[in-house]
Amino acid sequence: MNRRKLELLYNPVPAPSHYRNAAELYDLQWNCYSYGNKRAVVQQHISTVPKKPEIFQFKQTVMVTPTHLGFCAHVSPAEGRGVCTSICKRLTFIEHNLKHGCSRVGYTFTAVTPSKQRQRRLFNANTYSSAKNQKETFKLLLPSAIDQAKHNTLQIGRDVNAAH
């Protein structure tokens, strides 16, 4: 895991203006393939960037829950390598389950709720499917996420290494 790859996956996410008076939330996506021994790399990277991420999306955590000071983790209920979304404790979020037929697709689905009732939520779908599971597609998962998000912002994080 090199620093350059982390920077490429450090994405600004459009967010409503009530989030820290900023136009964006920052999201860090990482296909880490076993998080445990790479935690120091992530911490070092975070300490060097000018804008700290509010959302972490981890894929292939190998059933270890990535923990960071000041973040709450939402771990995938599916079996396999593991998917985890960590959200800054300053933000309020709700964990959701999606009804779909993809039993081998790992995912987390969270809604970051605004501080004011009239403002829109930011929905975050963090997905992972092993390259071996090419029969499993996201055709049922993604429409379910879109249906739940409705007119709110929906961010979908995926495994960039998967052929499907």
Image: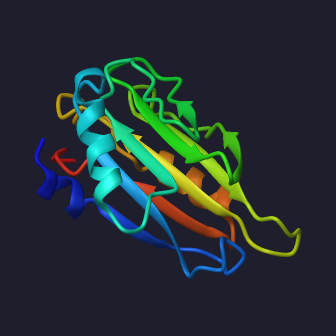
Q: Is residue 15 visible?
A: yes
Residue 158, compared with residue 64, is above or below; it is below
**Residue at 34 percent of width and 52 percent of height:** 47
The quarter holding residue 40 reads top left
The mark total stands at: 0
| 22 relative to 42 in the view: left or right | right
Name the residue located 48 percent from the left edge and 35 percent from the top edge: 68
Instruction: Point out residue 75 in the picture as x, y percentages from the top left corner.
Output: 52, 29
Q: Nearer the viewer, residue 51 or 66?
A: 51
Q: Position of residue 155 (x, y in %)?
A: 49, 62
Q: Quadrant of residue 134?
A: top left
Residue 118 in the image, given as x and y percentages of width and height: 87, 75
Question: Position of 98 compared to 136: left or right?
Answer: right
Would residue 89 appear left or right of 131 to someone viewing this image?
right
- The image position of residue 57, as x and y in percent, is 41, 45
Instruction: Specify the quadrant that holds the N terminus.
Output: top left
Residue occupying image coordinates x 27% and y 59%: 9
> Which residue of the protein is positioned furthest toward the right in this rendering?
117
Here the colouring is: rainbow
The one nearer the camera, 71 or 155, is 71
